[in-house]
Amino acid sequence: MAQDKVVSGKVISATDNSPLPGVSIIVKGTTTGTISNIDGEYSITVPSDEATLVFTFVGMSTMEEVVGNRSVINVNLEEDVTSLSEIVITGYGQQKRSDLTGAISSVSSEMIENMPTPSFEGALQGQAAGVNITSSSGIPGQAMRVSIRGTNSITASSEPLYVVDGIPMISEDNSALFTGGYNANSMADLNPDDIASIEVLKDASATAIYGSRASNGVILVTTKRGKAGKPKINFNYYTGVQQPTRVIDMLEAPDFIRMLDEAAANDGFGENYFSGGGPGFNFIGDPEDPELQNTNWYDEIYRNGKISNYSISATGGNDNVKYYVGGSYFDNEGYVLGSNFERFSGRVNLDAKATDKLSFGTSISLSQTNQDRPIGDNSLYGVAINSLAGDPTMPVFEDDGSYADPFVYWSWWAFENPRASTDIYSRSTDTKRALASIFAEYEIIEGLTFKSSWSGDVSLVNDNSFIPSVAAQSRRAGTNGEGIYATFNQLTWLNENSLTYTKNFGDHDLTALAVYSLQESQSEFSDINGQGYALDDLPNLALASDITSASQNGTSWGIRSFVGRINYKFKDKYLLTLSGRLDGSSRFGAENQNAFFPSASVAWRISEEEFLRNSGLVDDLKLRVSYGITGNQEGINNFASRALWSTAEAYQGIGGAGPSRLGNGNLGWEETSQLDIGLDIALFNGRLSIVTDYYDKNTTGLLLNAPVPGFAGVLSGVATQNLGAVRNRGFEFGLNTVNVDKNSFRWETNFNIALNRNEITTLVNDTTRIGSSHVLMEGQVLGTYFMPRFTGINPETGNPEFEDLNGDGFINPDDAQVVGNIQPDFFGGISNTFKYKGFDLRVFFQFSVGQEIWNQSRHAYENMGMVKNFGGFFQPYGNISVKAYEDRWQNPGDESRTPRLSLGFRREEDGSLTRLPNTPEDNQNFSQFLEDGSFVRLQNLTVGYTFPSKLLSKTKVVNSLRLYAQGQNLLLFTDYLGQDPEVSSNGESVTAPGNDFGALGPPRTITFGVNIGL
Amino acid sequence: MKNISIKLSLIFAFSCFALSCDVLEQEPQASITPEVIFASEQGADAAVVGLYSFLQKDENYGELIPFAMDQYADVSTYAGFFEYYLDLDRNVVPATNTAVAELFRGGYATINLANIIISEVPNVDDAGYTEEERAEDIASAKTFRALAYFDLLRHFGEYWDSSSQFGMPLFTQSTGGDLANVAFAERASVDAIYQQILTDLTEAEADLPDSSDKTFVSQGFVQGLLARVYLYQKDYANAITRATQVIDNPNYELLPNYADVFSTGGNSEDIFKLLFNTQDPSSLSTFTISREEVLPDPALIAALEEDPNDTRQELLGQGPTGTQIRILKYPDGAGNSDPALVMRLAEIYFIRAEATALSGGSLDDALADINIIRERAGLDPVAAVANQDELIDLLLSEKYKEMFLEGHRFFDLVRLDRYDDVLGIEAFRRILPLPQRELDIDGNLMVQNPGYSN
């Protein structure tokens, strides 16, 4: 038996020669090991000179050293370019990427930091294959729509589950204010700079561990934690400007009048109907008059938005205590007047090692956000809506300084002066959010660890809204000012207790996990509406003379779960994962309260087989297959299974009650089975890597607010039932190449593309219409447009023509048919990163092709001269766009897609008026305004310079310094006629997406920033 | 240290097991189960109040019953962008129109609640709930059920022809609020629906009070409704009898001043007025005042301005912004507290006049009833009419000016066969199509009204 001997040394990074703390050093084939200290130093006892030391560290190539006769072994660890040893966070654990059997996309903090967006989802756009992220609005702090591998649900939520440091985060909008389809984004409560990595779990193998909430995929957010070593302080700052992507070019005042004159002439009213004669009936103005008022309404409501972010963090610690402390302030004035978002946030993450066996820690995040938003679309008094067709001959202000009133000008369309909407209608939401958890971990015996954690997600929301007495909404109703004050508070607590067992038996590696989890959420909300204010300057509800309504209510839900998982690995070649979760939910009927969600997956690392192992060409070749079942229970009412009577059925102040919800004792989980076949390839020493997946997801027992007959006696007309099925099949492809890497020049390309085919496979009530534009229909995709079909402009008459499907002589919604859908044929992104010495350049394009957008706004700004007739007094509908004016049909034989100008009334020989059919207003829900929404967007362009550390070391203070300029959404290539194809006036609606009705597109943002490390 | 940490872990572990049963047991905070409702008199009374609340909905008298068919007729025009009003205004109403769906659903919601009350009230286990109180609650429910069937029938059924099969599906049993008990049915005949209405009303009549509180259903309202139903059925003798019964009831007197009819409280002219208040608002002024979308038809303005002495002109007026003339019967844009007039005495005079004239009775008697209404409006009485046609013309024109935007005009034009002259619509459009959504759900078990495609 050989002598034990002590070996010591220092581990440094080959990249920058800095000491590496936390490197694991193990004597090969034994369990003897140690970890390098803050200065990268270690000391270990080895049994003999034949012993081999294995040095492993995240992100570095593993190194082996035979001890021999040395007693000091210093090691330089190289950066691992293949990223196979990269640690990937998984549900309730973590794994080396090479050991994964599921489909997981990772996005590192570099891709999130410095992105000028209020919330981290904005930074994920186009980065991960199969993850489609769209912003429904350009108002800062509004929710984004995130769909992973297609849309699975109709009534229940289609948004993924967000898990932040192990806490399923409540991601719903808790504001009580009506903003016209737009939801506030509660994910914006999180500071993106605190995020270390984001993992997107896509297949059942990865997600089933979250069981009943995993059908839509899971997004794991891991925040930064302390590392042993010298304290590091990072300061990040950026500031910049925002603008709308595009502005719709509207007619100037003289052409507005000429346009109406032509419309009148076309309809038998003679020449100069609106400009002849002089002041009086139906006289708008003289187009030749140089004094003619000319207002561009978009110029009036848009501004140069501002965005800036300050964030500072400190990390450090020793072997026993590690800390991360971060604070930030984010401030964004949107490009629309009246839209602001700001966030203050702070985070403390602590890890402490109490004994060799016991460790504990905490993650605490506190934030406060304030959002001011103007009234959105779908509101009569909305900002964009009133600008759409605003009368250019109307001034913003009258001579006396008051807001001009659209009712005395020439646009029937406008209900309010858009500037009054931005300036005097106020609505704001303040949110205080705490996400906190404490945890303790104890190693019972070697390899067996018990972990217990308690977490809380607390959200306190205050809403304030005020419409002063001078506003049109208040004047017309005679309310003398209207105010709303609302509160929402929610506590969601989570307790999880887990046992993990890890064991190596020669060629066999086994990890087993068991978790018992309880979660409960309780919320309380109230709102008060008042009117009759003495003064517009004091919008406090205490001063409202009349409280029109006041209510208080609450709700709650709970989930109890048992979770298990086994990871097994044989010879590093054959990998197996089995997982299962038994969930019980308070939401479901007694019959179906519990459900089990299993998954199984296998992977074969072909590259580890003898025939490939030493090829030198193939770093990794792995085939993955997984199958599993996940569930969905989000988005339905907490008491959807119960027969309920509402007690809000009062009459004359006497309390009453009436049926509000049909009981459905059989209500249960929506289930999604998913098959995934994936192939991972890495070649040429990390120069080329490919991740590709095929999946087939079948969702059955859809939680659907399905129509019930009128006889059922509930006014909602629906009951939540498990009806119908949806299928999503698709293909994802991700490619990463290092094109050039020599002479300090590195060029890297990342490309991803995804195809998803969505289909409603079973629907009990086939052809369920959603509003006047969409339909749910078997064999069609979710988000199918159902409208009368536009067939073109008659070249002889200049009138639009439509298919009279039922042949009754009228074109109306009874003639609706499938005319398109919102689902893209494919989407993805491509980024090229160039690095030369200290310079870096990143060019990132995002694309989405084949989706159709219903540009309903066009019925307003392409009204083609239509008027409303008030007993012979003609009130024009509103202004039209320059493009519509230029493209209009003018003479018989003209081929055009834009109809002739027309008032919508014809004057007959005898002087009587005939109302003409198919005016743009009549046709607003017809397919004439359906457009191809395909686009390619230069989503990001960044140029940066990192100062050489040699230079900085002279300062003795600054360790790193980078300056950069960044453009977000710089260029947009699309045939779409509206402001931006990436919009939805119905927010995150799954059943009626893709509607653009005065929607505000995402902003173009240019920022300058600095990253300083001390 | 080691022991402490083990203990700590155990505390963590056990505290949650102790909570485990709780998280799956959650209770709603603002709703209640039907079992609780019918456990006491207080609960049963709440359900009866619920009937009034259902009648207040937009689907019923809170908006659509007074407004939808007047929009179809020549009472109002629409200056907004809600498709359902635009369809009505254009006189081409597709089966997918949302007002059509809501009127249907609103009617059956009232019927469903009435069915539950009628079936559950006898079983309420509460000694303090007397037989008289139970009988009155059941009578109220039957009155609501009859009103709802009648409103459904005249919107969707061929009510002018008792032998027609195009009535409405008939449900009189309770579903108990459970999805499993919801059934489909074919349309019953028009006659079957009339029989159900008459049975309910005659049974309710005795058990309801002859009350001077016009804001709840009463014996007088049941009698007035009987008069209206008999008139639609062309049972003129019974219509005259019932109308006379109401006119002779001292609880009901015409108000001297027309504008006072639309005051917010109950008054002597009311027979049944549904009250609203700011906390329990209607949508009536939302459309006429706040949104300025339901506006008087030029023909109505002309008719009211025909005689400068006609005091009913006061119910038209300009708004604070702009040029539009608005109907001021529901003027409270700020509070939305204007009442809906389900039935008032003026209508009963018209019913008796119409029944008298059409049954071959004295045209002078009929004219006398119409003159009562004319004189109250500040007009001179009409001395004589030459024949029945002339009387009907006069009646239609007077009722138009008297009861605009109270939801009568369209049915009058159809009943008296003037819809083609006045509105120029085809015969099949005398009634609305059945909602497409209902036909989709029941697989076309109900047969669509003749003339409507799909």
Image (spheres, rainbow, N blue to C red):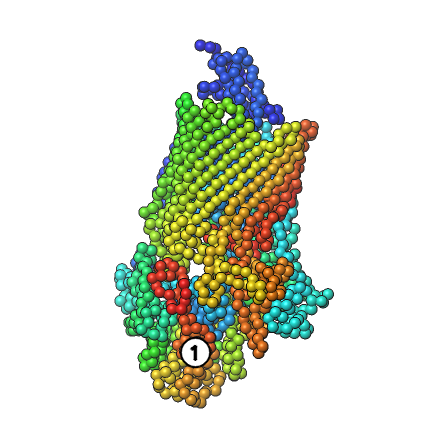
Q: Nearer the viewer, residue A84 or B138?
A: A84
Which amino acid type is shown beneath numbered disc 1? Arg
Please, what secondary structure does the residue beneath circle 1 have? loop
Residue B13 visible within the image: no
From the viewer's side, name the closer residue of A311 and A895. A895
Return the chain for callout 1: B
Residue for point 66% across, 66% down: A258
**Residue at (34%, 46%) from the top-left corner?**
A592
Q: Identify the image quadrant of the N terminus of chain A.
A: top left
Rendering quarter of residue A776:
bottom left
Q: Residues within 10 Å of mark 1 (few under 14, many from 20)?
A: some
Q: Position of residue A891 (x, y in %)?
A: 62, 65
Measured as percent of width and height from the top left, residue A198 is found at 52, 38
A678 lies left or right of A964: left
Measuring from the top left, give residue A51's x and y in whole percent: 49, 15
Query: Could you say which quadrant of the image residue A706 lies in?
Result: bottom left
Residue A846 point in image, percent of width and height: 57, 43
Check the picture and name the quadrant holding the C terminus of chain A: top right
Residue A603 appears in view = yes
Q: Which residue is mark 1?
A: B418
A138 versus A902 height, above or below: above
Q: Is residue A277 above or below residue B96?
A: below
